[in-house]
Image (cartoon, rainbow, N blue to C red):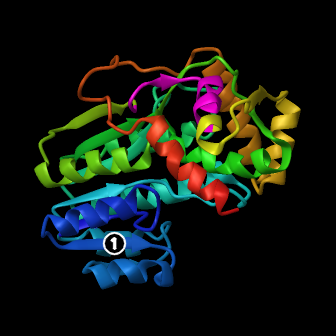
Amino acid sequence: MYVVMGATGHTGQTIVRHLLRAGVPVRALGRNAQRLAPLAAAGAEVRAGDQADAEFLADAFRGAEAAYTLLPYEISAPGYHAAQDRQGEAIARAVQDSRLRHCIALSSLGADLEQGTGPILSMRRQEQRLSAIDRLDLLVLRAGAFMENFYGALGMIRACGWFGDAFAADAPLPMIAARDIAETAAWALLARGWRGVEVRELLGERDLSHAQAAAILGQRLGLPDLEYRQLEPGEAVDGLIGAGFAPDLAAAYVELAHSINAGLIRSLQGRNATNTTPTRFEDFAEALAQAYRAM
């Protein structure tokens, strides 16, 4: 049995379907039974429950060969870090109580830093919790920025003809498609080839700046002059709140952007064949263009 948290999310759903195609039993966890129903129809055992409930998680982990874990969150819920810590502590307690032997934890570049990384700080704390569990073989996947984040820019592009964020226009960062993270995680779950605590970075196909991403996206949208603009911190926070972010998460996100602009968040392992993944932003932008045309 293989357990997948966040089974209806960007990475979890792809992992579940990959494992099912491999012919292994899968227990898919999520918060919404209705959204889990398609995975049940595909052959997964599904369980809906509170991801901060250690007993629910321990029961789900018990007897599993391996589990994929992450810290889910609602962008509109206040108290981001407190909620993340509750979930992280529940996951760690469940891993220990269930005697799970192999665990994958989704994390982020920048989790090596002690401050200034906004939402990534909760992932750092979770890495530390899981790393402290005796006899647990832990694989930490530190991923770059999700390409899926650009879905949030489509409304601004439609309304304004440009889009903006707190990131410097020319600051390069590794951008990765969630499906590439999922494929890596699924193969790792099946192989279980790590021992002790291992950290693997996932850096996407190449580093891109927001200006470069805007040029590629503009071509796909039929907007060759599409412009990306760096927003002032207050503007960025207000924009995120207007998009549904809780104020504390919006402020944390802008803090993260400042650290990226300053070059503080970077790969520690260097780009190589193992941590470079196949999906190009040019190809991902086709899906963004379809979503844009459907608006």
In-image side of 73 versus 163 (left or right): left
Q: Is residue 212 magenta?
A: yes
- Where residue 80 appears, as percent x and y from the top left, is 66, 52
Q: Residue at x 51, y 52 (%)?
A: 287
Q: Amino acid at mark 1?
A: Ala
In this rendered view, identify the residue nearer to me: 49 or 185.
185
Magenta residues?
204-217
Q: Residues within 10 Å of mark 1 (few under 14, many from 20)?
A: many
* Residue 235 quadrant: top right
In-image side of 281 versus 263 (left or right): left
- Where residue 198 appears, as percent x and y from the top left, is 25, 34
In this rendered view, identify the residue nearer to me: 72 or 20.
20
Picture layout, residue 1 above or below residue 133: below
Residue wearing tag 1: 28
* Residue 55 quadrant: bottom left
Picture layout, residue 81 above or below residue 58: above
In-image side of 79 versus 204 (left or right): right
Q: Residue at x 47, y 23 (%)?
A: 207
Quadrant where the N terminus sits is bottom left
In this rendered view, identify the residue nearer to me: 135 or 176.
176
Q: Residue at x 47, y 83 (%)?
A: 33
- Using the rendered image of the protein, determine whether residue 30 is visible from the camera's viewpoint: yes
- Using the rendered image of the protein, determine whether residue 117 is visible from the camera's viewpoint: no
Q: Residue at x 32, y 69 (%)?
A: 58
Picture layout, residue 111 above or below residue 266: below
Mark 1, secondary structure of its residue:
strand
- Where residue 288 appears, as percent x and y from the top left, is 57, 50
Q: Is residue 220 magenta?
A: no
